[in-house]
Image (cartoon, rainbow, N blue to C red):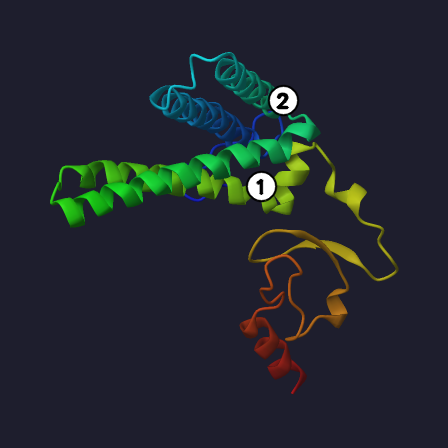
Amino acid sequence: MVLAGSAPTAAQGGDPIAHIHRGTSFIVLVDGAIVMFLIASEMAALGYLGTTGGTAFVGTGIFLSLMIYGGYRNRKPWAYWPAVVILFLASLLFASFAFLYVLQAVLGGIFSGLLFAFLMGWAALGSGRRALFHWHPGYRMGYLRLNPMDTFALHDGEMLAACPSCLAVLAIQPTMLGRADRCPHCSAPLVGEDLINKYSDEEA
């Protein structure tokens, strides 16, 4: 399993998601730090950071961010979706800054901000992709260290196979597959047109 844009590496200790998980854990840590820095900066500009409530809010946010990072790094089930929230929140903030820099260039003629717009846009795309990857069933099972065999109750004539498009593990009956059969995760066809035509020609 290789995240788009990442270099393929050998699985470490038989763990196919170790490389992706390690990189995503680091991004969760960095994104959490950036989100809290931006929140603290905004509160300081508004004069709230020096108050008891403002300081407690920022301190609690930093503590929760570090706790989520630690739980995600150790593959705790409870930290899975909170980490996704951090990634999505950071992606939205980066995208907002990119949009503001573009507006500044278009309306104010300050074109030096286009470089920052590009960097913010790239960061938003990277964090967003990492967040979306958590809906991949293979990554979810790898994170939870689940054996795909444990999630299926196979009936007579069924076997396990991977979707050719998203690699989701499915229980199928090979002799019953046709053009209308699609993956429940990505909706891609489970049987290629070339394979169908090949067997149709052989039967003819």
62 over 102 or under it: above or below: above
Q: Residue at x 54, y 43 (%)?
A: 133
Name which of mark 1 and mark 2 comes first in the sequence: 2
The image quarter containing residue 44 is top left
Looking at the image, residue 94 sits to the left or right of residue 102; the answer is right
- Secondary structure of residue under mark 1: helix
Q: Nearer the viewer, residue 2 or 92?
A: 92
Q: Callout 2, which amino acid? A: Gly
Query: In the image as oriented, which residue stretches furthest toward the right?
Result: 156
The image quarter containing residue 172 is bottom right
Looking at the image, residue 66 sits to the left or right of residue 116; the answer is right
The residues tagged by marks 1 and 2 sit, at their Cα atoms, a distance apart of 15 Å
Can see residue 13? yes
The numbered dot on residue 134 is 1
To which residue does mark 2 refer? 71
Q: Residue at x 67, y 60 (%)?
A: 184
Q: Residue at x 63, y 43 (%)?
A: 138
Q: Callout 1, which amino acid? A: His
- Secondary structure of residue under mark 2: helix
